[in-house]
Amino acid sequence: MAVTDPTQVIREKASEYPGVDEGTACTQSSFKSSGKSFLFIGMQGGRYKAMFKLRKSIPQATKLAESDPDLYQVGKPPWVTARFTAAVVQRVGSLFRTVFVDTIGVD
């Protein structure tokens, strides 16, 4: 079965962690824990976009951005942006656990 919304898996995983509130910011789904945003995700410009809040993982994100700048961008720390299609969603989804642990401190 084809994935119609590849962000669904990431959004569901984000919602599973304790104390997470889901909302909307502009056209993106937003996720917060303890009043602090850690993920914005949704469609933008014909592909999907996820903005993760990272701290300890910035060096790994920087390497991704250097090797694949069309997909990853390190912005003003601690924010990292990933842009993707359904074909690469597994690469982005695999980052989520690291993002949540890095941002919220829950393993």
Image (tube, grey):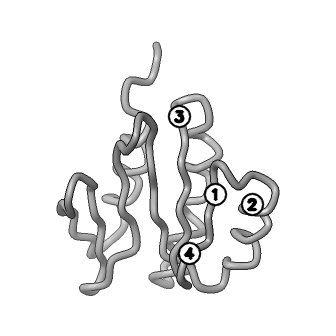
Q: What element carries label 2?
A: helix
Contact check, label 2 and label 1, Cβ < 8 Å: yes
Instruction: Find disc 1 in the rendering and name its residue.
Output: 72
Residue 89: x %, y % from top left:
56, 39
Instruction: Find disc 4 in the rendering and name its residue.
Output: 75
The numbered disc on residue 64 is 2
> What amino acid is at disc 2?
Leu
Instruction: Find disc 3 in the rendering and name its residue.
Output: 85
Q: Is mark 3 on a helix, strand or loop?
A: loop
Q: Residue at x 67, y 78 (%)?
A: 58
- Mark nearer the N terminus (2 vs 1): 2
Query: Mark 2: few, some, or many residues within 10 Å (few <14, many ≥20)?
Result: some
The numbered disc on residue 16 is none
Q: Is residue 93 positioned above or below 65 on the image?
A: above
Q: Which residue is drawn at 59% across and 85% down?
A: 55
Nearer to me, 66 or 86: 66
Label 3, label 2: how far apart the Cα atoms are: 16 Å
Residue 103: x %, y % from top left:
49, 81
Mark 3 or 4: in front is 4
Q: Residue at x 40, y 41 (%)?
A: 45
> What amino acid is at disc 4?
Gly
> What amino acid is at disc 1?
Tyr
> What amino acid is at disc 3?
Thr
Query: Mark 1: few, some, or many residues within 10 Å (few <14, many ≥20)?
Result: many
